[in-house]
Image (cartoon, grey):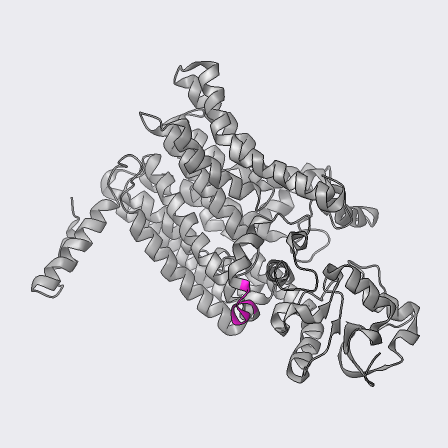
Amino acid sequence: MTSPMVRRAATRLPVGPLGRRITARIRQEWANLDADPIGRRIPGTGVVIWLSLAIGLTAAIITTSNGSNLWYSDAQSHLTIARRIIESKSPGPGQLGTVWLPFPHVLLLPFVQVDVLWHTGWAACILGIGCLAATTASLYRIASLVGLRRAGRIVVVLALLANPSLLYTFTTGLTEPSLMAGMLLAISGLARWGLQKRPPTGGELAVFAGFPAAFAVLSRYEGWALLAAGSVFVVIVGLRRKRGWAWSLKMAACFATAPAIGITAWLAYNWAVYANPLEFMNGQYSAFAQQKNLLDNGMLTSRHNIGVTLWTYNWALIETAGAVLIVCAALGLLAALWRWGPLGRRTLVVGLLAVSYAFSLLSLYLGQTAVNNDHSFPENWWNNRFALSVCPLLALLTGVLVDVVAHRARILGAAVVLSAIMVQNVWWAQDLTGRSAILAEAAQSHRDTLDSTAVGRYLAEHYQGGGILMDESARGNAILPSIGIPLANYDIRASGDSFDEALRNPAAHDEWILATIPTPDAPIDTGPVDLVAKALRENPSLAARYRIVFSSGDHALYQRIDNGG
């Protein structure tokens, strides 16, 4: 049934055949937003996809225009990893590295081979826009499957798409976009399997939930928690359908096979490349090694402290999702428990969306990761984007809140909620880099690389050929996309033997050296050590055939003063 508001709007459209077709299409799409699911088809999904693509493209145009899509050092690192698999001094699958899971880099692979897309970060924007559409459409489908009507569904979609922190992140090379797309696609598949009267077959469960879950487990480690939670969900629902343990476990195996194969492949890769299947967990570049340094210096304050863990992470969530959405979601949670019961199948679907929240709290409490913001000790900005994957949960619960309102008041409730979110966005917009934890974190990363970026810009403007020696893994040096020179010209840590040889005799291999300026009193143990600066510090004669042609802060660019050899 078309609402009076839509009918009045439609009557003002142009008359004639074209006008009638437009009017009919608007009415149909409006009706689709309130239609029941029909098997795999959920009316309204197409409109949500197109809306997400348009908003994602707009966000990408804004961030690439001001360069903020490259503010995160990690974002530039992901673009570099994806490109060096094919284009570097030692290309191959070994360039995927460890610690960071491989799927985001594989997805970026075709886009980063185009110089302009890599240099500007548009490669990540293209991927992020697609992930945004997949994430939002999947959340809309979940909202439809749990029984929300039009007003609730609209609130769910707009509550997600109105989040500036989320839109910004989906224009960067970070791994959250592919994780969220994989998780939401998987949960959508699980929701359809668990909530429809006639459940899909095991094969359909594998295709529509298992394969997306595999994408998630190979994107970020939150996906591994989803694998466990999703398997439990399938078993519980199977038993409630009175199908018995054998059938329930078989269905769980159908869901879990693809992601389990993904995890096995990752372990095998680490074993083959690093001779340690757990290299990503306990190796030189692992989170364990990073957190140990913080722990030794008394800076890992959340470890084994539930109060600090909850305080720090929840502030990250408040400064990412916003207090308005969190309050609405809290009320929506109460409404969901009242409407569906604490163990209802719809409530269990909501629980799947809460997996990221539980996983992040556990990781923080165990000291496997660190989060810092303006309410933590120490006060700085670090890993607040871990709260981003909780936003779909908050958006869905906000939609539930609107949906429980009496039918005639739903539109009014939706208008009130969305107006409050927009007021919050206006407040955010007055100081995005100070009030949004993710934008503040990105801005801090940008400030930390201002000197290396200035040196890199000088190199790009004056480069006429020759090799370049630098340690791109050192803190502040993840700037290769912004420089834009092809990776085959670099001797970097990821180059392996080529890098080691260049460190021993730079002048024989490279025209340029980009490094921190080696001074006797400069600290070299705060974060990843710049191995090039360390070599110059320990053996100043290595720079005898070079002169500093440009410097900014503690970063310098050296150019060879003879022909090498």
Can the viewer see residue 337?
A: no
Residue 249: image x %, image y %? Answer: 49, 20
Q: Which residue lies furthest to the left in this view?
A: 16
Residue 128: image x %, image y %? Answer: 48, 57
Which contiguous range is marked in magenta? 112-118
Q: How many marks?
A: 0
Residue 404: image x %, image y %? Answer: 32, 36
Residue 227 falls in image quadrant: top right
At horizontal 45% and vertical 29% (from top left) the residue drawn is 348
Q: Residue furthest front?
A: 565
At horizontal 47% and vertical 22% (from top left) the residue drawn is 250
In the image, residue 146 sits, relative to residue 50, either above or below, namely above
Report the side of 146 relative to 507 (left or right): left
At horizontal 41% and vertical 25% (from top left) the residue drawn is 344
Q: Is the magenta stretch mostly helix, strand or loop?
A: helix
In the image, residue 167 sits, relative to residue 450, either above or below, namely above
In the image, residue 493 sits, relative to residue 515, either above or below, namely above
Q: Which of 114 and 422 is in front in this view?
A: 114
Residue 155: image x %, image y %? Answer: 35, 48
Q: Nearer the viewer, residue 312 or 562?
A: 562
Report the side of 283 relative to 393 (left or right): right
Residue 333 in the magenta stretch? The answer is no
Image quarter hosting the C terminus: bottom right
Residue 228 falls in image quadrant: top right
Residue 114 in the magenta stretch? The answer is yes
Report the side of 534 relative to 378 (left or right): right
Can the viewer see residue 422?
A: yes
Image quarter hosting the N terminus: top left
